[in-house]
Amino acid sequence: MPKSPPRFLNSPFFDVVIKWMSRLNTWMYRRNGGEGWGGTFQKIPVALLTTTGRKTGQPRVSPLYFLRDGDRVIVAASKGGAAKNPMWYLNATANPKVQVQIKKEVLDLTARDATDEERARYWPKLVDMYPTYEDYQSWTDRTIPVVVCEP
């Protein structure tokens, strides 16, 4: 049984705020090459994930917390614990070819859902990095996807 999420979480207003915060973060990240503001948030490293819009075919950029595991980049499709998966996840599911920018390094990768074993390994590491992921998981009935981006 999930804890009660904040009331705004599943409102249209939340989606608008996320959209504009993401645009600002992306602009800052690109402006300073991922160093300083934009490259970290709450002292946690941020990467830019570029997917292809499943309806528009246009590039869509999302700043996300991430983990590195060798040549893999691991991200959580949390959307702040909202009831629905984030658009970037839906786009990556429809077209798994993605780009990940970490500072000035740009990687062409393929995104996929983590296997059960990978999820068991990566989810605790994601929570160690950003403990609020546990709150997000408690606010939703969906299992927050862990996404592996690899060559």
Image: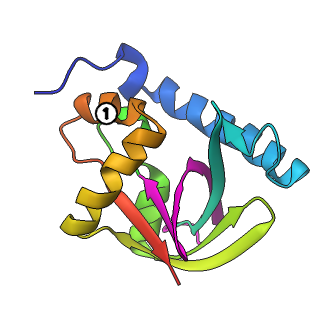
Q: Is residue 85 visible?
A: no
Residue 49 image position (x, y, % from top left): 60, 61
Left or right for 85, reference 52: left
User: Residue at coordinates 76% horizontally, 41% vertically from top-left?
Assistant: 38
**What secondary structure predominates along the stretch shown in magenta?**
strand
Q: Callout 1: few (<14), some (14-19), or many (20+) C-alpha neighbours within 10 Å?
A: some
Left or right for 51, reference 149: right
**Chosen colour scheme:** rainbow
The residue labelled by disc 1 is 134
Instruction: Please say if 60 is above or below 19.
Output: below
Q: Magenta segment, which residues?
A: 54-76
Q: 122 or 49, which is in the foreground? A: 122
Q: 110 or 9, which is in the foreground? A: 110
- Is-magenta flag for residue 71? yes
- Is-magenta flag for residue 117? no
User: Residue at coordinates 89% horizontally, 49% vertically from top-left?
Assistant: 32
User: Residue at coordinates 30% horizontally, 20% vertically from top-left?
Assistant: 5
Q: How many labels, in total?
A: 1
